[in-house]
Image (spheres, helix red, strand yellow):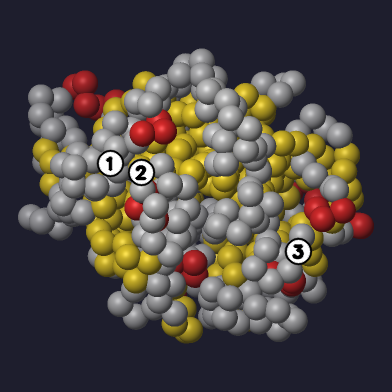
Amino acid sequence: MKLIHSALSRVTGVLLLAGAILVPYPGHAQTNLVVLARDGAWTWYNDPRALFHNGTLYFGYVRHGDGRTVLSAFNPRTATTTDLWTSTLTERDDHNVPGLLVRNDGRMLALYARHNTDLFFNYRLSTSTSPDTPEQWGPEQRSADTAARMTYANPVQLSGESNLIYNFARNLNFNPTVFTSRDGGATWSEPMIYFRSGSGSVRPYVKIASDGRRRIDFLYTDGHPRDVTNSLYHLYYESGVFRKTDGTAVGYFTNLPLDLDRGVSGSVIYQYSTEPQPDWNQWIPRGRAWCWEIVNGTGGPVCVFTVRLQGVAGPNWRGNRIYYYYARWTGTEWQKRLIAQAGRPLYDREGDYAGGICIDPENPNVVYISSNAREPFALGSAASSELAPDERYEIWRGITSDGGLTFKWEPVTTNSSVDNLRPYIPRGHQGRPALLWFRGHYRAYTSFQTEVVGLFSTELPLRAPGANAP
């Protein structure tokens, strides 16, 4: 597979602009990095938030300037971006990014909700199988009101279930809630809790992946790590049954919810513990986990997650440190490794917000991280983690050739004047991946001045002087 930086070995120089590596291809006036949106950010709990379809990149984000949820399309053949639609409702909050789905008939569905604000979610359907103009998208629609406020959108369609569409959100009892559609997203079922736990501020956080045929994987926590001594778990759904990673059945879709408070549990990936022990590959004493991403590779599920340890370098939030983990199912157990230091949290009120980590869904041997640690890969002294002199978040790519036991790392950004955050690999890239992230000043999920950029493995034509310059 051609990786994003495979061209580096064939060129004589690398140009750094605002910390982003641009790869000049010999004999071409081209670059493979482009600014996709001058104002935009996203949270990591809406997926897919970017995907390729018929050669076009579709990506969602939230603008801070006007608080609109936006879907845009980027054509790599012409290096042009088109804004397809914006939400009618506004809210300056990165949680409101859309989840995207290419339906079985080739048309697209986008779902989005404001952050714990409304009793409904919004959705739009494309009228074309290549909906790369605003005219090829239908009007904004609303689901029926529910009895609770809505957050997040994660659409999945299973061809093995007569193309039933699921939307996984947070809604009833502030818990993970699912809606279904049997008509391609035109109408939606009543909501149903699928993981029940606690109430109010206590709720599991869930990351979702699917093969699009029969299986849906769930990576989830006990709650928010600021509230709960979080462990991390895995379940998967197939043919109406929820199972642990080894296939042990724990519940049925017809009998939802799965009651986590009554002992129903998936396979444990990371177990919270206060017990001291020197091998942080197993656990960090008092370290609280949070889920970031899961994919189902050919060898089974692979996931990445964070663990936060409080007070490593001082008594306030700046003294907290976050660590990145990689775990894969070997066929008999979850094998996990501490792979990098993430540095400190992004800001004080969210002490578990890391710069971000993601997996290439088509090659789980490749991961990307954002870190502001001085030495992100010096893991022998992780407990005394120092920050980079300017505390700037940079992006790195890691490749493993031994199933995640060790990684080889190389920088994607260096000497940046702004932070580089929440890297993401769009789905459906078919062996020609792109890396998206946003960069700028991120003060809170409601306050950011950031732009969305993309680093492509394909050559992008330079439209005009400065047209795609960062």
- Looking at the image, is 13 positioned above or below residue 80? above
Q: Residues within 10 Å of mark 1 (few under 14, many from 20)?
A: many
Which mark is on residue 198? 3
Residue appearing at x 79%, y 37% in the figure:
244
Q: Is residue 49 left or right of residue 258?
A: left
Q: What percent of the width, then of the height, locates residue 14?
A: 13, 33
SS category of the residue bearing label 2: loop
Circle 1: element type: loop
At a point 32% along the width and 65% down the height, the residue shown is: 443
C-beta proximity under 8 Å, tags 3 and 2:
no
Distance from Cα at disc 3 to Cα at disc 2: 33 Å
First in sequence, mark 3 or 2: give its number. Answer: 3
Q: Amino acid at mark 3?
A: Gly
At label 1, the amino acid type is Leu
On residue 95, the disc is: none
- Whether 432 is drawn above or below 184: the answer is above
Q: Nearer the viewer, mark 3 or mark 2?
A: 2
Q: Which residue is mark 2?
A: 313
Q: Which residue is depicted at the point 23% across and 40% down?
A: 388
Give the residue pinned by disc 1: 387
Q: Are marks 2 and 1 in contact (CB under 8 Å)?
A: yes
Q: Of marks 1 and 3, which one's residue comes earlier in the chain?
A: 3
| Residue 310 image offset from top left, x and y in percent | 47, 47
